[in-house]
Image (cartoon, helix red, strand yellow):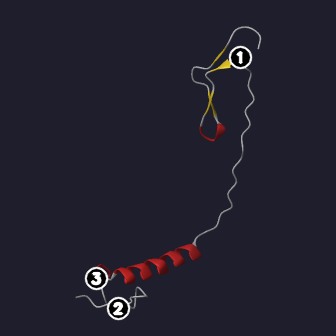
Amino acid sequence: MLARSSCRAFASCSTPPWRWTIAARKAAFAKLQRFVVEQALQAPQYVMFGVTVRSKRVRNYVDGLLTTPKFHQVWLETGSG
C-alpha cells in the first residue's frame, strides 16, 4: 500500500510522481495550473468582422476563412439583376 502523502509541492515531495495518490495528483495539477495561468502572457485579441456585398447575378460565391473571398468557379449570370 502506498503512503498517502499530500505531495503539495513538486520539489519538496520525496514520493515519485508515478506513486502519487489521485488526491495528490489533483493537488499537484491544481498548483501547476494556477502557476501557468498566473505566468501566462496576456495579449489583447481583435477580431475584425467582415461585410460582403454582392449582386444576385453572382453565382457560386463562397466566403473563405475569415471572410476572405474564394473565387473558384464563380460566374455572373446573364441578364439584369
Q: Position of residue 13 (x, y in %)?
A: 36, 90
Q: Which residue is mark 1?
A: 57
Q: Name the residue rendered at 25%, 88% in the picture.
A: 2
Q: Earlier in the sequence, mark 1 or mark 2?
A: 2
Quadrant of residue 6 within the rendered picture = bottom left
Q: In the displayed structure, does residue 58 sit left or right of residue 15?
A: right
Quadrant in which the N terminus appears? bottom left
Q: From the viewer's perspective, is 80 left or right of 25?
A: right
- Callout 3–callout 1 Cβ contact below 8 Å: no
Q: Crowding near pointer 1: few (<14 within 10 Å), some, many (20+)?
A: few
Q: Which badge, 3 or 1, is on the more N-terminal residue?
A: 3
Kind of residue indicated by mark 2: Ser
In three-dimensional space, the C-alpha distance between marks 1 and 2, rounded to whole angstroms, equals 73 Å
Label 2 Cα crowd, 10 Å radius (few <14 / some 14-19 / many 20+)? few
Mark 3 crowdedness (10 Å alpha carbons): few <14, some 14-19, many ≥20: few
- Of the pair 54 and 23, the residue shown nearer to us: 23
First in residue order: circle 2 vs circle 3: 2
Q: Residue furthest right?
A: 80
Q: Secondary structure beneath disc 2?
A: loop
Give the CA separation, mark 2 to mark 3.
10 Å
Quadrant of the image containing the C terminus: top right
Q: Position of residue 19 (x, y in %)?
A: 28, 82
Per the image, the residue denoted by label 2 is 5
Query: Would you name the residue on which mark 3 appears?
Result: 19
The furthest residue to the top: 79
Q: Residue at x 75, y 29 (%)?
A: 53
Indicate the position of residue 33 as horizontal and vertical percent values. 50, 75
**Secondary structure under the numbered disc 3 in the rendered image:** helix
Kindly identify the amino acid type of the residue bearing the numbered disc 3: Arg
Residue 16 has which mark?
none
Asked whether the beta carbons under mark 2 and mark 3 sit within 8 Å of each other, the answer is no
- Eyeballing the image, is 60 above or below 27? above
